[in-house]
Image (cartoon, grey):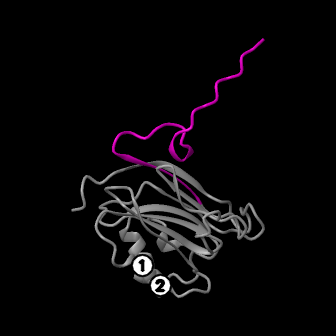
Amino acid sequence: MRLAEPRARKYKCGLPQPCPEEHLAFRMVSGAANVIGPKICLEDKMLMSSVKDNVGRGLNIALVNGVSGELIEARAFDMWAGDVNDLLKFIRPLHEGTLVFVASYDDPATKMNEETRKLFGELGSKNAKELAFRDSWVFVGAKGVQNKSPFEQHVKNSKHTNKYEGWPEALEMEGCIPRRSSAS
C-alpha cells in the first residue's frame, strides 16, 4: 500500500514558499475577458475581488502602507466610460512609500491620458506608456521608487494571440515585496 503524498503546504496568499522576514506576500490576478473579475491578495487578506464586490471594469487599484502593509484604500476606475480625473485624484497625492497594486479588468487604457501614463511610470511601470484597449495588465509599484518595478506583466490584446474571443489571457503574478523600514 502506497502512502498518499503529503499535501504541499501553502503559504500566505497561496504562495509556494514563505516570504523572507520583513517582506509582504502578495498574489494578484487580472480579470479574464469581461467575465471573471480580478483579485488582489496581500499577506493572506483579499484586498479586492468579485466576492468582496469591490472590483470593476478598468483599473482595480489597492493602495497599501509600505511600512505596515495595511490597506489604505481600494477602488476600481472605469477606463472605458469613466472620468480619468477620478483616477488622477486618487494617484496624484500618494505619500512616499505607498505601495500601489493594479489589476486590469476588461479595458485598462481607453481613457488613459499622458499624465496617467506618466504617473504610473513614476510608480515604476515600464508598460503603462503602451497600454491599449483590452490589454491585460498587473503591476505593483511604489511612490518614490528609483527603478522600474520587477512586479509587472502585460499582454497585448491581439486577434492572433488572444485566449478568449476579443481578449487576451488573464495574468497571474505573485511574490514578496520588501517592507519599507519607515516612511521617509
Is 8 part of what is drawn in magenta?
yes
The image quadrant where one finds the N terminus is top right
Residue under numbered circle 2: 86
Q: Where residue 89 appears, x then y in whole percent?
A: 41, 83
Q: State if disc 1 and disc 2 touch (CB < 8 Å).
A: yes
Task: State which quadrant residue 52 falls in.
Answer: bottom right
User: What element does badge 1 sit on?
Assistant: helix
| Residue position for label 1 | 90
Quarter of the rendering containing residue 115: bottom left
Disc 2 marks a residue whose amino acid type is Asp
Residue furthest out toward the top:
1
Using the image as rendered, state which of residue 177 and residue 14 is in the foreground: 14
Residue sitting nearer the eye, 176 or 117: 176
Image point (70%, 64%), residue name: 36
Tell me the kind of residue under disc 1.
Phe
Classed neighbour count for the residue bearing mark 2: other residues with Cα under 10 Å, few (<14), some (14–19), many (≥20): few
Task: Calculate the distance from the C-alpha at mark 2 to the C-alpha at mark 1.
Answer: 6 Å
Above-or-below relation of 83 to 64: below
Q: Is residue 152 visible?
A: yes
Q: Position of residue 170 (x, y in %)?
A: 65, 60
Q: Quadrant of the C terminus?
A: bottom left
Q: What kind of secondary structure does the magenta stretch mostly adopt? A: loop
Q: Residue at point 73% right, 69% down?
A: 159
Q: Is residue 175 left or right of residue 82?
A: left
